[in-house]
Amino acid sequence: MLSVGRVHLPSDIPIVGCELTPYVLLRRPDKSVVTEDVTELNPIDAHFLRYRWYRVQSDRNVAVCSVHPTEQATLQCLGCLKAKLPVSKSYHCSPKCFCDSWQHHRVLHERAASAVNENGNEEEEIFGRFNSTGGTTSSMVSMSTSQSNPSFSNGTTALYPAAVTQKSGGETWFEVGRSKTYTPTADDVGHVLRFECVVVDAETKLAVGAPVALSTSRVIPAPSPIPRRLISVSGMDVSGHLDMDGRISSGGTFTALSYNILSDAYATNELYNYCPTWALSWTYRRQNLLREIVGYRADIVCLQEVQSNHFEEFFAPELDKYGYQALFKRKTAEVFSGNINTLDGCATFFRRDRFSHVKKYEVEFNKAAQSLTDALVPPAQKKIALNRLVKDNVALILVLEAKFGNQGVDGPGKRQLVCVANTHVNMHQELKDVRLWQVHTLLKGLEKIAASANIPMLVCGDFNSVPGSAPHALLAMGKVDPIHQDLTVDPLEILRPITKLTHQLPLVSAYSSFARAGVGLGLEQRRKMDPATNEPLFTNCTRDFIGTHDYIFYSADSLTVESLLELVDEESLRKDTALPSPEWSSDHIALLAEFRCKSRTRR
């Protein structure tokens, strides 16, 4: 007879919105094991499994700490209630917790107080959940364990009311699910979930033996970071001066997002042991990443480190629901030796109501390496050269046509096209020559597209190159100083002659606009910029590294920057040691820029 041998959950900490799928191991009479789902429609040995999920509610409500979500709250911040912030943000597990987090917690109050501008209209907040103003009172109230808090509500209506069973000890079980997988809801917060499975005779529909059960810890709400605002930088050209002509002749604005989301294959406990296991799990991270990406409402989304299976099974179908069309370029697999389905790549999404797809180009740097070695490297050294150059990196280039204007900015009847490049350059820091060669190869390809189509360009991605490095100089300045230190690493002499390391694209880093910002919020962002390079202080923050690797470059002759997604303060991240964290599910931060098309002379 079929029997249940083992049941367990990958994580015993359930989070609102994140699927729970128990691992169930079955044993057959011949001692063989079965791990797949055995349903009534597909029984094994005339038996199947019946599942039940219950919410176990006690007679008293339980709130969880906003800082340590696995701990029960004992204090509540009255300032949050007066400011009408989400009540979940107001709870703390101890006076020490409240005091230690006050420096970050008070930002919530300040944001709420400044959410109404001079005209009485709320400022737009990206990825925001707060929409009311209020005071910044730092009072807090103690919550006794017997106190019933009217602001903390967990639903009492069962999904299957007939299955509610009153238990002893002041607990009530509400049946909330009848499938193997269950997704906790807001009604489950603060409560334990119980999973039961039992073998059922397919003919009689009667249970065979006792149910096997497990209980989780209390359900916690999905942590939500402080919202990032879109900061206006419009009215300035690349020199920091007003550009009224460009604005007047504009034909519409659009937003572009670039984000390395951290592939699940790289999100290991060994690399990120400071991040709680539940927050590092893909079931949690994928929902948190999706919530963040959708919240930005970008017209164009460029993602890096997207696993092939996650693109097909999750991101493409989920973002399709929000009106995005998806294209994907997987890394080549000449070096990669693992499961091909987990190999990552670059995914670009665009809103169907804003753009239509015109053309796609795929860049495989491995192919370029083969062509290079065939042309320049002696046969005896070809294997050594390919071992150094072949790293599986790729780029995805799309030509899109805008739908947000009846005509292009260059005159009636002209199509408004935009070229978007999305790439992830080689990460190995000792391969400086390879990284520079990959960037140069990409730019030469983009030059050919620009020459044939004369359209605005966006170059987005993770370039694994800090500001001031040779790849960054090539992108931003169009050339590399012949005495640049990075050029000393060139064992294959693929960078010779150095005079070839140029391009004619008028590229400018979008975030350099913050360095030219004047008063107001833009000035606040300047403090998060490196004055020596006019780039963000960091876009990648782990325990062992902090620096900028991610960029959005644009062609300054045809686009102007209207707004930028505000940068993240390092101090706010260090409360969780580094990225990724329960709030932010990648070790990189997202970059987003709003652009306006303008008339330009032909290059």
Image (cartoon, grey):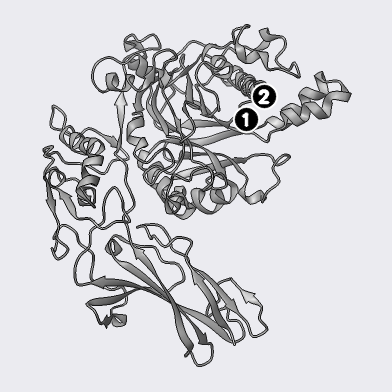
| Element marked by disc 2 | helix
- The image position of residue 161, as x and y in percent, is 28, 78
Which residue sits at x=39%, y=60%? 13
Q: Residue at x 53, y 87 (%)?
A: 202
Q: Can you say whether 28 is above or below 302 in the image?
A: below
SS class, disc 1: loop
User: What residue is shown with label 2?
Assistant: 434
- Amino acid carrying mark 1 in the image: His
| Image spot of residue 5 (x, y percent) | 55, 77
| Label 1 neighbour load within 10 Å: few <14, some 14-19, many 20+ | few
Task: Describe residue 141's horizontal placement relative to residue 292 as left or right.
Answer: left
Instruction: Name the residue rendered at 23%, 48% in the picture.
Output: 89
Q: Residue furthest right?
A: 380
Of circles 1 and 2, which is in front? Answer: 1
Q: Is residue 385 visible?
A: yes
Name the image quarter holding residue 332. top right
Q: Is residue 414 visible?
A: no
Badge 1 is on which residue?
Answer: 428
